[in-house]
């Protein structure tokens, strides 16, 4: 998959539907904002920001924070822009995560992503983790709420059934990596306090911080 498929309206609708159907994702989001992100948050970067859900969630807790969202889908970008039309401090930009992150973004206290990075090949995931690390301020944090690869085909089938996806055709752009590999890549990128903080079958919240 080249990434151009995300420019179709159908793709955006499929993504929105999938997100709404994910069980227990709200539990992971609550852990993120209530426990994992600490201190003052002045700038937020959302990778694969979709309709702006994660930016809105964080700005409920840190309303003064400036936020930048990067996405490839015109329909989802438009939805995010509508969401934040009456707000200041939020900017949504077009960017393909297969490409290096744009220059000139500045430094961030929090970088987040949800249901986006698993569409990237593993080599690009590793590169992206390193790019994110460079964009973080000291004590900044990166968290990714996303799909990971089950260790076996049987466990994958169990997970899909739990999500209500059994019998549904596999998304050809899905390229989830094993949890242990992603934790290793975060360590290699320089992150501290690397952990999987929450997991429900193949849905996990992983991340780490940038030490001073």
Image (cartoon, rainbow, N blue to C red):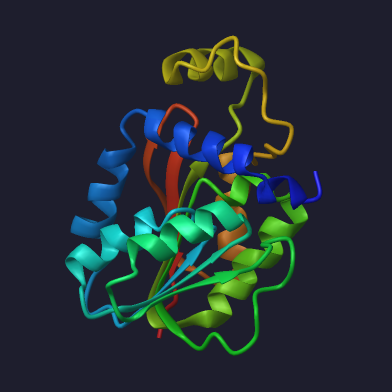
Q: Nearer the viewer, residue 141 or 186?
A: 141
> Is residue 193 visible from the viewing direction of this image?
no
Left or right, 153 with reference to 145:
right
Q: Work out which quarter of the rendered image holds the N terminus and state it.
A: top right
Which residue does the image show at 81% across and 50% down from the upper left? 2
Number of marks drawn = 0
Which residue does the image show at 67% across and 30% down from the upper left? 171
Which residue does the image show at 30% across and 61% down from the upper left? 56
Left or right, 144 with reference to 73:
left
Q: Nearer the viewer, residue 184 or 36?
A: 36
Residue 187 in percent (x, y) is at 56, 63
> Is residue 45 visible from the viewing direction of this image?
yes
Residue 78 in percent (x, y) is at 49, 60
Corner quadrant of residue 110? bottom left
Q: Work out which quarter of the rendered image holds the C terminus and state it.
A: bottom left
Which residue does the image show at 71% across and 72% down from the upper left? 100
Residue 172 in percent (x, y) is at 74, 32
Location of residue 161 with respect to 38 vertically, above or below: above
Q: Nearer the viewer, residue 15 or 33?
A: 15
Corner quadrant of residue 112? bottom left
Location of residue 158 with respect to 113 vertically, above or below: above
Location of residue 88 with respect to 96 vertically, above or below: below
Residue 134 in percent (x, y) is at 57, 81
């Amino acid at each position: 998959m080249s990434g151009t498929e995300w420019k179709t309206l159908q793709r955006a609708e499929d993504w929105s539907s999938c997100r709404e159907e994910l069980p227990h994702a709200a539990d992971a989001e609550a852990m993120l904002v209530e426990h994992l992100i600490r201190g003052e948050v002045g700038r937020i970067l959302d990778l694969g920001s979709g309709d702006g859900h994660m930016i809105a969630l964080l700005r409920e807790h840190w309303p003064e924070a400036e936020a930048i969202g990067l996405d490839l889908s015109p329909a989802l970008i438009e939805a995010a822009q509508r969401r934040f039309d009456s707000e200041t401090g939020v900017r949504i930009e077009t960017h393909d995560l297969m490409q290096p992150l744009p220059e000139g973004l500045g430094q961030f206290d929090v970088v987040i992503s949800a249901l986006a990075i698993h569409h990237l090949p593993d080599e690009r995931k590793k590169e992206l983790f390193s790019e994110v690390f460079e964009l973080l301020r000291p004590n900044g944090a990166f968290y990714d709420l996303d799909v990971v690869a089950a260790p076996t085909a049987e466990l994958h089938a169990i997970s899909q059934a739990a999500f209500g996806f059994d019998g549904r055709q596999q998304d050809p752009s899905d390229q989830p990596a094993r949890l242990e590999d992603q934790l290793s890549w975060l360590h290699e990128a320089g992150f501290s306090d690397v952990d999987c903080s929450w997991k429900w079958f193949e849905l996990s919240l992983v991340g780490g911080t940038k030490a001073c």
